[in-house]
Amino acid sequence: MTATPPPEGMRAGARAGTGRGSASALTWPLRLVVSLLRFLGEIVRANLRVAYEVATPGFHMQPAIMAVPTRARGPVELVLLANAISLTPGTLTLEVDEPRRMLYVHTLYAPSREEFLTGIVRLEDILLDATRLHGRSA
């Protein structure tokens, strides 16, 4: 039996469908630091948005409560995501539905469900890169 070569443009050991090699356990400390810096950037961005709302006249908020499906594999990832959401100004996790891996989140800024979920997925990507030994795609 002979081994088939990897598809064109894909390194040996890379995952199909991701377009990049699998994250190594050796890169985990670096991913942890980068994820922390990205999370701090998200917090700064949210703080500036809330500060703008407070400092300017008028009402620009579009509050909503959203059900958010997650990619969490266990209760630790689910709780960490819920806490990361609550730490971000303008959002608050109201409920964690562990069996369904769902969060219910109150937000001050929800122009559309898709736009809101895009921000949550960005936050979830940061968290999963930091918590999973082989990255979020593992």
Image: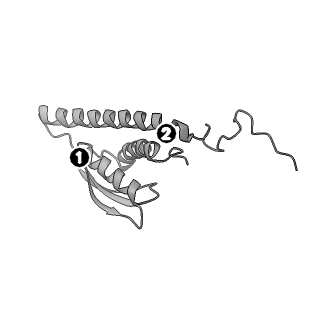
Q: Nearer the viewer, mark 2 or mark 1?
A: 2
Q: Secondary structure at mark 1?
A: loop
Q: Position of residue 118 (x, y in %)?
A: 40, 44
Residue occupying the far bottom of the picture: 99
Q: Is 48 located above or below residue 75 in the figure? A: above
Q: Horizontal placement of 19 versus 68: left or right?
A: right
35 relative to 107, above or below: above
Residue 40 position in % (x across, y down): 31, 35
Residue lying at 20% horizontally and 37% vertically, measured from the top left: 50
Pick the residue in front: 27 or 81. Answer: 27
Q: Amino acid at mark 1?
A: Leu
Q: Quadrant of residue 37?
A: top left
Q: Which label was assigned to residue 28?
A: 2
Inspect this view and state whether residue 38 appears: yes
Badge 1 density bin: few <14, some 14–19, many ≥20, Cα 10 Å: some
Label 2 residue SS: helix
Question: Which residue shows up at 32% across the image and 53% down it?
Answer: 82
Residue picked out by circle 1: 108
